[in-house]
Image: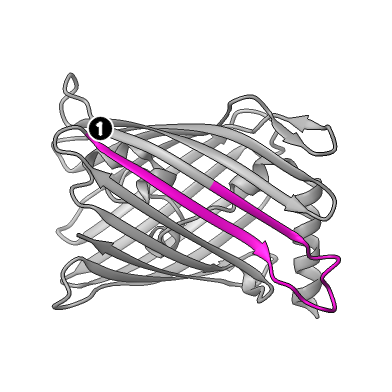
Amino acid sequence: MDKILSLILFVIFCLAGPGYAAFELQETGAGNTAMAGAVSSIVRDASSLLYNPAGLGLAQERELLLTQFNPYGWDLLACGSAVYVQPFRKQGSLALSASYLGTLEDKDYKSQLDYSEVVIMVGYGTRLDFFERSSAGIALKYLSTRSGQSDSTGFGLGFGFLYEMRNKINLALTGKDISLGRINYSTGASEALNPMVKLGISADLLKNFTPSLDLGMRIRGAVDPFQAGLGLQYAYRFLSIRAGFLYTGQEMFSLSTGLGVRIPYLKGISADYAFVYHTGLDYSNMFSVSLKF
């Protein structure tokens, strides 16, 4: 019963809160979640589309990334995503993703729990010939939400820069949820998105150990605009161990951990798992599978 009540509160928040809240629910790749999403200076694969599109410029293989997310232990909430990246020789990479979050039908709570959202993204990243060891990218996001009360649609723009220093330190600058027009509701109301800018840094301190840090700031409309994430990763052969801490403002934070495995004898296939503890909410689980070819 407690989970049902908390889920009802979540749906009420999505309906009554600003539209950009729905943008924040999109995550992909359990390995990234296990590191608290503090991966803007690390990503070089399909998940770059969501965390830093500049990383697409460094992707070397075609990849399909599938993610299943069980947020806050809510069995009546379905969440998942699929991302595909297509590299082009010396001309960067193009990526496309589709994400879904929605409540499942329940005969006892259907009227209170009728909510769903779909996010479609397309992005492009490439190396910068005029600036050595750097890349840049851009991403376009389309959001559509549906509920028993109203529907909404909106567009957002994101960008990213990535610089790989000679001493194995990586620097990143990203921006997301830059409004392209306004979020429009079927009731006639509208609102702007709340953009966020992030700075990221990571370092290969040891051969297999990588810490990363992301610092973010909301440009407008946030009670507590500051966000900070710390991620740790240790990789040995085909196994990766990860952990993270994320502060999201207003004394809210989450702790995460997870494992990643590159499937032996199956080249290009890997699987990841993440467990997340949230203050004030139940835990979350995320699974993802990556196929590179």
Q: Residue at x 65, y 33 (%)?
A: 193
Residue 115, position as x, y percentages in the image: 74, 58
Q: In this view, does 34 lie above or below 249?
A: below
Front-most of residues 24 and 217: 24
Q: Which residue is at 47% across, 43% downward?
A: 121
Residue type pointed to by label 1: Thr
Left or right, 150 with respect to 82, comes to right
Q: What element carries label 1?
A: strand
Span of residues in magenta: 92-119
Which residue is label 1 attached to? 126
User: What residue is rendered at 64% in x and 55% in y?
Assistant: 252
User: Can residue 150 be seen here?
Assistant: yes
Quarter of the view holding residue 113: bottom right
Check the image and report above or below for 12 versus 268.
Answer: above
Compared to residue 198, the image places residue 242 above or below, namely below
> Which residue occupies the foreground of this view, 269 or 254?
269
Question: Is residue 15 part of the magenta span, yes or no?
Answer: no
Nearer to the camera, 43 or 139? 139
The x and y percentages for residue 106 are 77, 76
Horizontal side, residue 97 vs residue 192: left or right: left
Q: How is the image coloured?
A: one colour
Magenta-span inclusion, residue 104:
yes
Identified at 80% across, 62% down, the residue is 9
User: Residue 197: x percent and y percent?
Assistant: 50, 32
Residue 196 in view here? no
Relative horizontal placement of residue 83, taking residue 222 as reference (left or right): left
209 vs 259, left or right, is: left
Residue 177 in percent (x, y) is at 56, 34
